[in-house]
Image (cartoon, grey):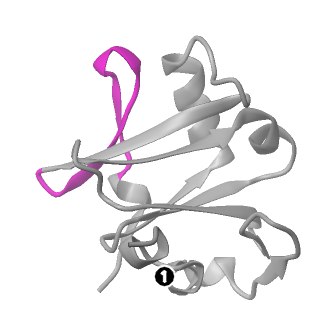
Amino acid sequence: MSKTANALSLEQSINLLPKDFHPYSRVQGRKKIIKTPKGIVAFRQSSLLACGQWKTSYNEDDIRTEIDYILYALGHDGILALSRDILLSFESKNYKGRWANNGYPIHVFKEDGRYFWQGMNGNTKDLTEYFIPFE
């Protein structure tokens, strides 16, 4: 099954965003990026994996210079809209090194109805306030 079939599409995810992200326009290119009144948004998606987490990554250089938000579809549960500030603050406290592509992981799990970012050494950040459910 394709990743798209196991997670919300870009269009479904955009439709869940608050009104202050609208109107939007697609940025041409290979990556799924949209331009909104709140800034540039990069789209990621993941199905729930056997380990009980949704997993993706982001490139630090892109976040520091171009991308203002990551719009992250968590299967068909809903989306996370994570700002540059959230991404960089968690990264600086939890990751000493990065992947070869200058990337940092975003591993999210759900516990007791709340969504958490799993960092190194078991550190977590509660992301529930940034979660928008798909109903």
Residue 118: percent from left, percent from top: 35, 33
What's under tag 1, amino acid-wise?
A: Leu
Q: Is residue 129 above or below residue 63?
A: below
Place of residue 84 in the rendered image (x, y in percent of width and height, measured from the top left): 67, 45
Q: Secondary structure at mark 1?
A: helix
Name the residue rendered at 52%, 78% in the picture. 13
Within the image, what quadrant is residue 78 found in? Answer: bottom left
Please state if 112 lies on the left or on the right of 48 as rendered.
left
Q: In the rendering, at what x and y percent does residue 6 appear? A: 37, 72
Up-down relation of residue 92 to residue 21 (above or below): above
Quarter of the figure with the N terminus: bottom left
| Residue 50 covered by magenta stretch | no
Task: Describe residue 104's horizontal placement relative to residue 37 as left or right.
Answer: left
Q: Which is more toward the observer, 29 or 59?
A: 29
Q: Is residue 62 left or right of residue 95?
A: right
* Residues packed near mark 1 inside 10 Å, few (<14), some (14 to 19) or many (20 plus): some
Give the camera-side residue of 35 and 73.
73
Relative to 70, does residue 8 appear above or below in the rendering?
below
Residue farthest along the left direction in this orientation: 112
Residue 29 found in image quarter: bottom right
Check the picture and name the quadrant holding the C terminus. Answer: bottom left
Residue located 67% across and 77% down the image: 21
Q: Residue at x 87, y 42 (%)?
A: 65
Across and down, in percent, residue 42 comes to: 69, 61
How many labels sit on residues?
Answer: 1
Tell me, yes or no, whether the highlighted magenta stretch contains residue 116: yes
Say which quarter of the image contains residue 7: bottom left
Q: Residue at x 74, y 54 (%)?
A: 68
Residue underneath mark 1: 16
Span colored in magenta: 112-127
